[in-house]
Amino acid sequence: MFLSIYRNAIARNSSIVIKEVVGNKNDIALITLNSPRTFNSLGKALMTELEDLCKEAENDPSINCILLTSSSIKAFSQGADIKEISQYTYEKIVSEDFPKQWYFLSDIKKTKVALVNGICYGGGLELAMMCDYIFGTKHSHYALPEIKLGIIPGCGGTQRLPKKIGKSLAMEMILTGDKITADEAYKAGLLTTILHSTPEKPLAEAIKYIETNNIYNKYT
């Protein structure tokens, strides 16, 4: 019942990031990227809202886990908002320490889980890799396509991906920009598990996995 109500609420909500509390113990903060028309492009406004909600969950003693997902079955995130970034000068990037705006998630101490449905590209993959666990649906796929724009992954992708899947495959993904499937990502070690429910219903399966395997609290 809750999941049906939640999906309906998401559809009516105009916020670009939404936070709810879920789980049998009401100790999982469900944070949803909710900009489906942009495939959750990670612009400054979205990242600011995301940071605020993650820090709110971090400071809430009743929350043991942050579950980060998307309201769209087509995309977790297509990556950084290229249109927005293209307006930045070098001086602006340096003065505002642009990459630092992304690193807040890695500083969150509570358990973080990324639930990926659809595409997870560029900055979206970098964001997911800042989490402790990545759950992917069988329809998800992953890439660092920045090379095709003549740039490199700028927010930790070149460091975190080799640690996750090894140097050889990471180099191939970074230097070609090619995507890998959920099965390939799981076999390589990028994913904790593949969720086999339909694209519309991975949330219940993810919550059950978190609670059944007791990963919602890294201290137990």
Image (cartoon, rainbow, N blue to C red):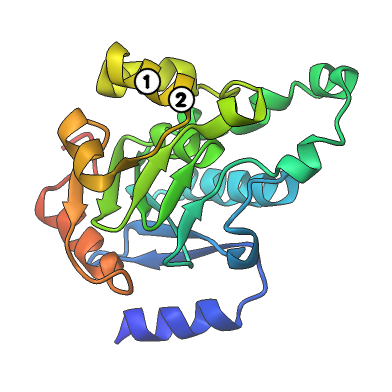
- Crowding at dot 1, Cα within 10 Å, few <14 / some 14-19 / many 20+, comes out as few
Q: Quadrant of residue 219?
A: top left
- Crowding at dot 2, Cα within 10 Å, few <14 / some 14-19 / many 20+, comes out as some
> Residue at the location (67% across, 51% down)?
46
Q: Quadrant of residue 147?
A: top right
Residue matched to label 1: 172
Distance from the alpha carbon under mark 1 to that under mark 2: 6 Å
Give the percent coordinates (x, y) of residue 9. 51, 82
Give the percent coordinates (x, y) of residue 177. 48, 30
In the image, what residue type sits under mark 1? Glu
Q: Nearer the viewer, residue 58 or 18?
A: 18
In the picture, which quadrant includes the C terminus?
top left
In the picture, which quadrant includes the N terminus?
bottom left
In the image, what residue type sits under mark 2? Thr
Q: Is residue 92 visible?
A: yes
Give the percent coordinates (x, y) of residue 75. 47, 58
In the image: residue 94, left or right of residue 81: right
> Residue at the location (74% across, 50% down)?
45
Residue 162 in the image: above or below residue 37: above
Q: Nearer the viewer, residue 69 or 90?
A: 90
Q: Secondary structure at mark 2?
A: helix
In the image: residue 111, left or right of residue 95: left
Residue matched to label 2: 176
Which residue is at the far left? 212
Question: Could you tell me if the residues under marks 1 and 2 are in contact, i.e. CB atoms within 8 Å?
Answer: yes
